[in-house]
Image: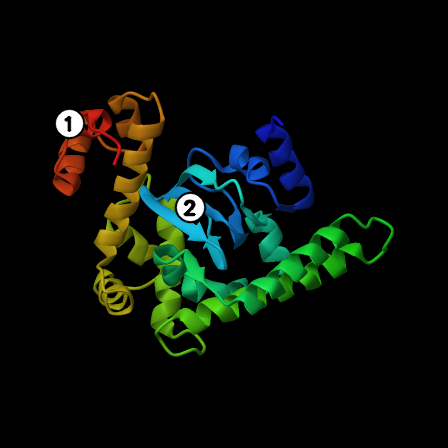
């Protein structure tokens, strides 16, 4: 069956939420670049492999994957015996129906580094039941409270997944600290502005703190500097554009707001050890 990505995007814009059980129904929408929505996958049986942020990862049976907007996804492949579910939600829809998004955000760093986790068969069975319920309710147009029912089921799904991820984290569970909240706000700004802004000063001003304070907090919370997070976002985007588009190096330089191609080339080589052209022509690992 041929999937029309444009039609799927239109459905997402109309309903805000989509649920699939086949990889074919989702791959055309999310590939080949950055996600513009939240994607959750429940692998009940079989396996799925994918390139996520240029790293090869694999889901096996009894595992869950949560990908926030901004992740780069490519080369998704499912085994012949794959069984599972895909849940896609637009950010606007989530922010409208899910107050708990504020609770998910402090875990953003953990999700980014560990999007796939193993869970118990009992937890998978619970998720499978909830996704079946959600899909049934989404197809029930006769209920005048359909939207409220769907919202309630989604909240239940997310609270269950949040509990699973939280239990897997090594830090104590609780309300996010001021430092964690600042880190979350910083990462959101980086996602939004990294194509134009690469200085810690810009983000500090946006967050109404000093550059020194922002740098100190980010280092304490994540173990990495604010500048490293900014550079990583720029370099990842550069690699994606070099690998997955026919844009010239000059066009890529312009899209990332570098003053000229030469400056972009020096920046890229400083962080990767290769020139943009060398990276584009190098074998895909």
> Residue sitting at 75 percent across and 60 percent down?
148
- Residue 249 circle label: none
Horizontal arrangement in the rendering, residue 249 relative to residue 158 (left or right) = left
Query: How many residues crowd mark 2 within 10 Å: few (<14), some (14–19), many (20+)?
Result: some
Query: In the rendering, at what x and y percent does residue 4 appear?
Result: 61, 27
Quarter of the view holding residue 137 = bottom right
Query: In the rendering, at what x and y percent does residue 188 appear?
Result: 40, 54
Which residue carries the number 2 mark?
Answer: 70
Q: 257 or 14: nearer the eye?
A: 14
> Residue sitting at 25 percent across and 22 percent down?
250
Query: How many residues crowd mark 1 within 10 Å: few (<14), some (14–19), many (20+)?
Result: few
Q: Is residue 225 above or below residue 77?
A: below
Q: Quadrant of the N terminus?
A: top right
Q: Nearer the viewer, mark 2 or mark 1?
A: 2
Quarter of the view holding residue 257 = top left
Q: How far is the residue under mark 2 from the one under mark 1?
A: 27 Å
Task: Identify the element where label 2 is drawn.
Answer: loop
Quarter of the view holding residue 29 = top right
Q: Quadrant of the C terminus?
A: top left
């Amino acid at each position: 069956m041929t999937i029309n990505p444009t039609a799927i995007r239109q459905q997402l814009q109309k309903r805000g939420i989509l649920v699939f059980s086949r990889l074919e129904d989702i791959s055309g929408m999310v590939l080949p670049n950055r996600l513009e929505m939240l994607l959750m996958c429940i692998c009940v049986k079989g396996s799925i492999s994918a390139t996520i942020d240029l790293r090869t990862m694999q889901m096996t049976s009894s595992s869950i994957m949560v990908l926030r907007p901004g992740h780069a996804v490519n080369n998704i492949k499912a085994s012949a015996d794959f069984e599972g579910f895909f849940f896609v939600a637009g950010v606007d829809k989530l922010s409208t129906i899910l107050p708990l998004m504020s609770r998910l955000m402090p875990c953003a760093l953990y999700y980014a580094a560990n999007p796939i986790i193993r869970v118990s068969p009992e937890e998978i069975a619970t998720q499978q039941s909830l996704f079946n319920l959600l899909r049934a309710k989404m197809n029930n147009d006769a209920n005048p409270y359909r939207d409220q029912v769907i919202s309630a089921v989604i909240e239940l799904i997310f609270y269950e997944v949040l509990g699973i991820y939280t239990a897997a984290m090594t830090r104590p569970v609780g309300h996010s600290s001021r430092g964690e909240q600042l880190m979350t706000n910083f990462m959101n700004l980086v996602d939004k502005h990294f194509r134009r802004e690469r200085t810690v000063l810009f983000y500090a001003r946006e967050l109404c703190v000093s550059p020194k304070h922002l740098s100190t907090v980010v280092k304490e919370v994540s173990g990495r500097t604010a500048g490293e997070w900014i550079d990583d976002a720029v370099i990842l985007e550069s690699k994606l554009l070099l690998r997955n588009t026919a844009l010239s190096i000059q066009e890529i330089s312009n899209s990332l707001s570098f003053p000229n191609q030469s400056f972009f080339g020096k920046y890229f080589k400083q962080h990767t050890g290769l020139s943009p052209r060398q990276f584009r022509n190098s074998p895909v690992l």
